[in-house]
Image (cartoon, grey):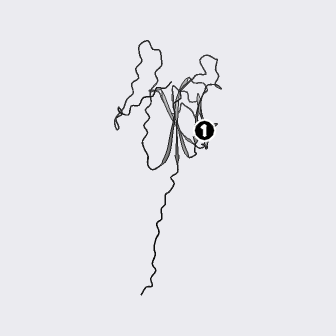
Amino acid sequence: GVVVFNITQQFKAGQTNQITPTQLENNSNILYGGILIIIYANNTQNTNIIINEGADLLNPESSGLTTNDYTIAYSNYENIKSGDAVLYTISAAADKTDGSKIIFNDKEYQSLADNYDSTSKISIVESNIDNLVNGTNTVSLQSINDNLFAMGTILVVTYPATPNIVVDNVDVTASKGD
């Protein structure tokens, strides 16, 4: 699964920050790289940032008991008001470009392997979403032929600014010129 820590006090703005996972003795767990999400206030745009930290190991290759039709992780985003949307998808070990799909409301966008870093084994894919709807939106992360770890999705929805116009009463005096 996913482990979440609040490291606000340890974070050093403007400097290199490093996450060092340490495997304990007699522990056979696989430690994938970590991600650090920093959210800054933006007073010029009305933006909702929704984080789905659900994680799932997707592996259609190993036992033969599962096919790629069933190796899908879902993220539901509910009560969404439509606007300009960007989806960030985070995964580990997704290294086959034709091995996975990112699907938003039944429309295929990219592969989880897009932007894969072979050193950290992490992939963070940014997709501009053009089919966001009011209400419930569903993200499907599907492994076709890749053993990968879906680590979560982040949906960022920005709404157009509504101009706020205030008009005071104006008194006009007309005079006839000389």
- Residue 150 appears left or right of 17: right
Which residue, as the protein is rendered here, is positioned at the far bottom?
178
Question: Can you give x and y, in whole percent of width and height, for residue 9 in the image?
Answer: 35, 33
The residue under label 1 is: 137
Question: Can you give x and y, in whole percent of width and height, for residue 89 in the image?
Answer: 52, 34
Would residue 75 be visible to someone looking at this image? yes
**Element under disc 1:** strand
The structure residue drawn at horizontal position 46% and vertical position 75%, both measured from the top left corner, is 172
The structure residue drawn at horizontal position 47% and vertical position 49%, both measured from the top left corner, is 45
Of 146 and 152, nearer the camera is 152
Image quadrant assignment for residue 119: top left
The structure residue drawn at horizontal position 43% and vertical position 32%, both measured from the top left corner, is 36
- Residue 160 appears left or right of 11: right
42 over 18 or under it: above or below: below
Question: Can you give x and y, in whole percent of width and height, for residue 17 in the image?
Answer: 36, 32
85 over 18 or under it: above or below: below
Question: Can you give x and y, in whole percent of width and height, for residue 114 in the image?
Answer: 53, 33
Q: How many marks?
A: 1
Rendered-image quadrant of the C terminus: bottom left
Type of amino acid under label 1: Asn
Of 81 and 131, nearer the camera is 81
Please tell me how crowded label 1 is: few (under 14), some (14-19), or many (20+) other residues with Cα within 10 Å: some
Of 113 and 163, nearer the camera is 163
Would residue 89 be visible to someone looking at this image? no
